[in-house]
Amino acid sequence: MLGCMQREPTTRDDGRPLPRLREVYADDFLIGCTLGGNPLTDYSSDEQALASTHFSALTHENPMKPGRIQPRQGEFAFDKPDAAVDFAQMHGMAMIGHTLVWHQQAAEWMFDSRDRARALGHLRTHIETVVDRYRSRILGWDVVNEAISDKPDEFLRDSRWLEIVGEDFVTQAFRMAHEVDEKTELYYNDYNNELPLKREKTLRLIDAIRQSGTRVDAVGIQGHWELRGVPFEHIEQSIEIYAANGLKVMITELDLDVIPRDFSGADLDGPANAGGTAEHAATKHPADRRDCPPEILLQQAEAYRRLFEMFRSHRKNISRVTFWGLHDGRSWLNSWPTRRTNHPLLFDRELNPKPAFDAIAYRV
């Protein structure tokens, strides 16, 4: 078991009260976390209590992705997503669907031919089935995830969706989702779209969707940032620019990596596609151990404090801030881009609040 919390998630080890994050930010925006697998069986009771106590929104980390929820044509794996939606409803958490279309973890059978009409037919059946199943139980969907290229001279990234369907596969997906459920919010989600290059491409993509008569309700800025280089100015500029274009903004996959890497972003293909190289530091970083050095945790706390101060100042335009993981032991950054022991979130592996928690929980 990763967590070993033997106390209430609203108290410290010495019995002092601990603020509930979902209450601290109740008047600002939803504050969320991710759970993977089956939240009711794959997480300890302490982990479940931590999630339900502090977070008002839930994203299912992997099981709703196309290749997981429909691995073979017509065979839907709804057991884990159903459990996640049930968990969210039991605890008054807004459920976020992630994701309907992605070039990674895709449903391979959808590309069984190079025929555009056939591929779109597969996509429509998938979206209609999944969105309809969770109608009125999900606040919104990441309809399309990471469709924009990181390369300066490309608009959309090279993917089978682009090759087989063409650039309008994004618009088609948004239209299909809207036609199934006109009330569910529809989001476009990506990494590095707070930076000028991808921000401009994001606005171009949103404009194309809107010009087709289809709606986009919000843009998700993932927020997989590295502690030594959080782009504070670009983040704030992008929140303002997206809002000026009539879009709500969500920080959808927030974590602060304390172990340096030589590229930015969150591309599962690795640094070759994320604008860096495959070379990583040969020596082990001081934070790559179970007990992160206190000075690094304090640096992380200050970065989180600055971020949440910014988010609160733009709360009229930000609808949700979601952490990608529940605690350090459940973070994807323990295995990507290399295997290491990372500390990117608010709670440690024993489910204790870190300095980062205090930095955002006690508003001054």
Image (cartoon, rainbow, N blue to C red):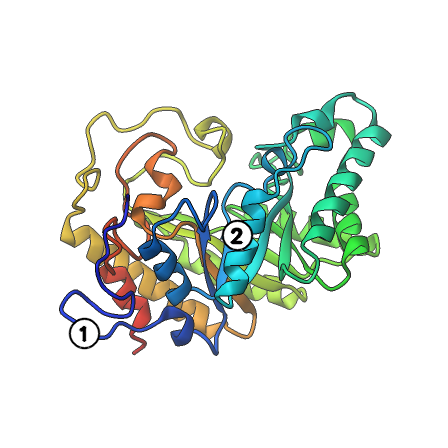
In the image, residue 242 above or below residue 226: below
Which residue is found at the position 79% from the left and 53% from the top?
A: 180
Q: Quadrant of the C terminus?
A: bottom left
Question: What's the residue type where badge 1 is placed?
Answer: Arg
In this view of the protein, which residue sits in the foreground, 75 or 358? 75
Residue 251 makes an appearance in the image: no
Q: Nearer the viewer, residue 251 or 203?
A: 251
Where is residue 63 shown, x and y percent of the image? 54, 41
> In which quadrant of the rendered view does residue 341 lie?
top left
Q: Identify which residue is drawn at 79% across, 48% down.
A: 176
Rendering coords of residue 296 (x, y %): 20, 51
Residue type indicated by callout 2: Ala
User: In the drawing, does residue 213 fall left or right of residue 142?
Assistant: right
Vertical placement of residue 6 versus 107, above or below: below
Question: Which label was assigned to residue 84?
Answer: 2
Local crowd size for mark 2, using a 10 Å CA cut-off: few (<14), some (14–19), many (≥20): many
Q: Which mark is residue 257?
A: none
Q: Can residue 230 be seen in the rendering of this structure?
A: yes
Q: Which circle, 2 or 1, is nearer the viewer? A: 2
Please state if 147 lies on the left or on the right of 269 as rendered: right
- Which x, y percent locates residue 62? 52, 41
| Label placed on residue 16 | 1
Placement of the N terminus among the 4 image quadrants? top left
The residue nearer to you, when weighing 129 against 281, is: 129
